[in-house]
Image (tube, rainbow, N blue to C red):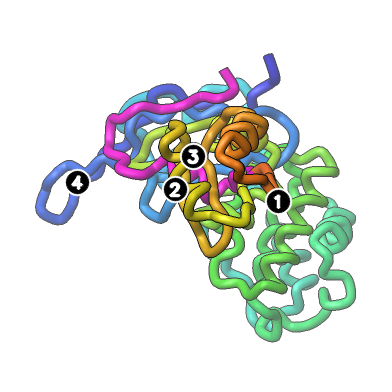
């Protein structure tokens, strides 16, 4: 079994709203993050991602359940593993009139980190050449990269990033994505919390999808995509007749413009054979691989608290 850097079992958090009513934010969450790579912690806003992260870091108290970081029970044992963890959960406070480098040097002195860590952190997040510019002149993407650099001063084994691309333009998103890839390649395990699934798909090696505070699916990205619906795009000269023949033949099919999309895990030869028996000859038969966003929307359609979950890695 792979070493787990994060593990929660039956994790639950219940809040009281302003009217004194109970609200479940996290509902019996089982989360397992293996060492190495980038693990996506995915779900819509309000699904319990940030609350879970805050509980792991000792910033919020769990109502029930257990949590372990590097095999150590938390929050009780958090002081013994805290130096191995870097996290960007809220907007960090930097001095606007200091340069990026000066901000990191000040923080390094506070943390007792060696000065060499500042240089390494700047280089790792790609701020070399802009590190002497004042923080207030930084773009939002550069500010996010400086926040990540601050967490690297401790040389962490685990980096937790909560919605790091929020509010960024495409260039800033690409910069953060490249930084996360570089960190993963250097041996740091990254837990990436996000609701932007299409973006996450480009960097994650594994993922856990949650909704309404509970785990809906977990596994490698390839496993998650294989567990979702699959199908084919079919191009024929008479798409209307092809749609009727496929529907009568037991296939779930729909037409978009001149293309018929078939949702099925049956081989493509079954589709072409059925159409050929009706003198419909296929011009093109292309497998359709579902993306992570489509899988998530399919998984959460009609989702209600307490429904079934899927562990595709099991």
Identify whether 43 is placed above or below 259. Answer: above
Q: Which one is closest to the eye, mark 2 or mark 3? A: 3
Rounded to the nearest whole Å, what is the CA distance between mark 4 and mark 2? 29 Å
- Residue identified by numbered label 1: 283
Q: Is residue 26 left or right of residue 231?
A: left
> Looking at the image, which is closer to me, 253 or 162?
253
As helix, strand or loop, the secondary structure at mark 1 comes to strand
311 inside magenta stretch = yes
As helix, strand or loop, the secondary structure at mark 4 comes to strand
> Do labels 3 and 4 touch, CB within 8 Å?
no
Rounded to the nearest whole Å, what is the CA distance between mark 3 and mark 4? 53 Å
Q: Which one is closest to the eye, mark 4 or mark 2? A: 2
Q: Which one is closest to the eye, mark 1 or mark 2? A: 1
Name which of mark 3 and mark 4 comes first in the sequence: 4
- Residue identified by numbered label 2: 297
Rounded to the nearest whole Å, what is the CA distance between mark 4 and mark 1? 60 Å
Disc 2 residue crowd, few under 14, some 14–19, many 20+, Cα 10 Å: few
Q: Please state the horizontal and vertical placement of residue 9, each as a whole percent of the image.
A: 44, 22
Task: Give the magenta part as a residue range.
Answer: 288-314
Name which of mark 4 and mark 2 comes first in the sequence: 4
Name which of mark 4 and mark 1 comes first in the sequence: 4
Label drawn at residue 246: 3
Q: Please state the horizontal and vertical placement of residue 246, each as a whole percent of the image.
A: 49, 39
As helix, strand or loop, the secondary structure at mark 2 comes to helix
Name which of mark 1 and mark 2 comes first in the sequence: 1
Identify whether 73 is placed above or below 63. Answer: above
């Amino acid at each position: 079994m792979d070493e787990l850097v994060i593990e929660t079992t039956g994790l639950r958090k219940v809040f009281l709203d302003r009217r004194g009513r109970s609200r479940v934010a996290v509902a019996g969450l089982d989360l397992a993050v293996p060492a190495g790579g980038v693990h996506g912690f995915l779900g819509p806003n309000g699904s319990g991602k940030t609350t879970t992260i805050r509980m792991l870091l000792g910033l919020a108290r769990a109502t029930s359940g257990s949590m372990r970081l590097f095999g150590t029970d938390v929050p009780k044992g958090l002081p013994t593993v805290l130096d191995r963890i870097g996290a960007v959960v809220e907007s960090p406070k930097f001095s606007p009139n200091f340069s990026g480098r000066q901000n990191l040097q000040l923080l390094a002195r506070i943390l007792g980190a060696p000065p060499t860590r500042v240089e390494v952190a700047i280089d790792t997040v790609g701020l070399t050449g802009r590190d002497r510019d004042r923080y207030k002149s930084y773009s939002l993407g550069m500010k996010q990269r400086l926040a990540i650099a601050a967490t690297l001063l401790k040389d962490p084994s685990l980096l937790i990033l909560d919605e790091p691309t929020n509010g960024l333009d495409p260039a800033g998103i690409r910069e953060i994505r490249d930084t996360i890839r570089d960190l993963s390649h250097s041996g740091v395990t990254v837990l990436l919390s996000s609701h932007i699934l299409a973006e996450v798909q480009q960097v994650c090696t594994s993922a856990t999808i949650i909704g309404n505070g509970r785990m809906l699916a977990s596994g490698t990205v390839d496993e998650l995509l294989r567990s979702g619906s699959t199908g084919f795009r079919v191009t024929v000269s008479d798409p209307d007749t092809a749609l009727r023949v496929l529907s009568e033949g037991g296939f779930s099919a729909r037409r978009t413009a001149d293309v018929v999309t078939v949702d099925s895990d049956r081989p493509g030869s079954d589709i072409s054979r059925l159409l050929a028996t009706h003198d419909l000859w296929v011009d093109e038969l292309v497998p359709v691989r579902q993306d992570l966003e489509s899988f998530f929307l399919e998984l959460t359609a009609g989702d209600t608290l307490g429904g079934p979950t899927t562990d595709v890695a099991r």
